[in-house]
Amino acid sequence: MKGSFSVPGDYIYFKSQVPLHKIPIGSKQWRYYDFGPKYVPPLICLPGIAGTADVYYKQIMSLSNKGYRVISVDIPRVWNNQEWIQAFEKFLDVIDVHHIHLYGTSLGGFLAQLFAQHRPRRVKSLVLSNTFLETSNFSAAMPWAPIVGWAPSFLLKRYVLTGIRDGPHEPFIADSVDFVVAQVETLSKDDLASRLSLTVDSASIGPLRLSDTFITIMDTNDFCAVPQELKDQVTERYPGARQANLKSGGDFPFLSRPDEVNLHLQLHLRRVGVEAQPELVQGTNRDVAGESSSDQNNERGGVDDESKDERRDYIGATNENSGSTNENESPLALETPFLGSFDNQILRNVHLSNDE
């Protein structure tokens, strides 16, 4: 990990364009991004222990620009897996989303499978990345799990960070590690303790009603914190799933290999019948930029969004630096060079097996 972290320019731009929502549901505080045409069944992204809703910003920018709806959430402070299922279902009810497609990495992939097992009518497909089927290995490796709630913040952060492989890395992987480490620093003691509790809470994934044909497994072939034998168990459990193998990418391929990950996600969504609505993209972007905080409060029951003034100031600064832009052009196109036509995507390095 580098000694200093420089915030990526595309992330700064993302924050200037996409509002962050914060909404209390019961005793839980949900923090999430929701971007793209509202009439499209959403792809909901669930991060691992070290992740936040922000780690999927490259997927939000790319897929929403193509006409897909992407929701990225922070895992709230839930302390066992049953509490997670109930809390996530209430969250979906509040934001008025009924049928979902889940993309989960590491712990997020485990929680996605768990929700699909217990709420099968709501989950229409799964994309699983570097994840696992049961928690016994992690609980055995963490004998102090019963007192995790009393552990000091610095100890919890150190424990989480030791699971991230430290260099040498190729530049894009090193940047992804630095970004996630910076996100870990934003997490509170209770955030970290609750996520570690989920990892060691005794649970395993039972049979899913979801057909294997609606599952994509997207693993990296170089290294990650989840042991290879646990990843192999996922592959064996879903023999009919589509295998999307990434040559490299480390623990965070959504940041280090975003073009490949976004392409696999788009292929998955097309395969399971999600129809993008690119004709609604410009209207969606205008709606997001123009929504007032009072509208959000009325719609979500107390949602706290990022300042629109900050977004407007940043857009002005960007326009001064990059020249004038067509006012009818989608603002997401300014600093996202990878957002081209799908048919023109370079399919090199994309390895799909089990083709239909």
Image (cartoon, helix red, strand yellow):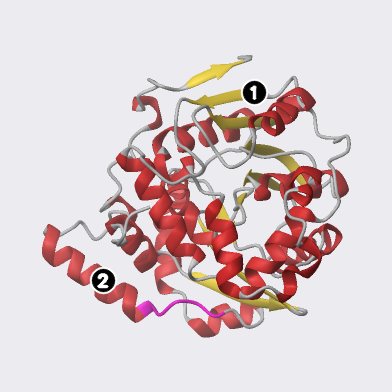
Position above or below: 278 against 152:
above
Q: How many marks?
A: 2
Q: Is residue 203 above or below residue 33?
A: above
- Pinpoint residue 256: horizontal percent, then vertical percent: 40, 42
Residue 286, located in which quarter of the rendered image? bottom left
**Contact, CB < 8 Å: mark 2 with mark 1?**
no
Q: Residue at x 40, y 48 (%)?
A: 176
Ranked by sequence position, the earlier of labels 2 and 1 is: 1
* Prevailing secondary structure class for the magenta stretch in the rendered image: loop
The answer for how far apart the CA atoms under marks 2 and 1 are is: 41 Å
Instruction: Return the residue nearer the eye: 324 or 256.
Output: 256
Front one among 268 and 153: 153
Residue type at mark 2 is: Tyr
The stretch in magenta equals 304-308
Quarter of the image for residue 224 reads top right
Q: Which residue is drawn at 73% across and 49% down?
A: 141
**Residue that carries the numbered disc 1 in the rendered image:** 242
Mark carried by residue 30: none
For label 1, the SS is strand
Quick check: 166 left or right of 204? left
**Residue under circle 2?**
314
Q: Is residue 306 magenta?
A: yes
Question: Could you say where residue 71 lies in the image, as x and y percent from the top left?
Answer: 58, 56
**Residue found at x 61% / y 38%:** 130
- Residue 335 lies in the magenta-colored region: no
Q: Is residue 30 left or right of residue 53?
A: right
- Residue 306 in the image: above or below residue 166: below
- The quadrant where residue 232 appears: top right
Of badges 2 and 1, the one in the foreground is 1
Front residue of 111 and 26: 111
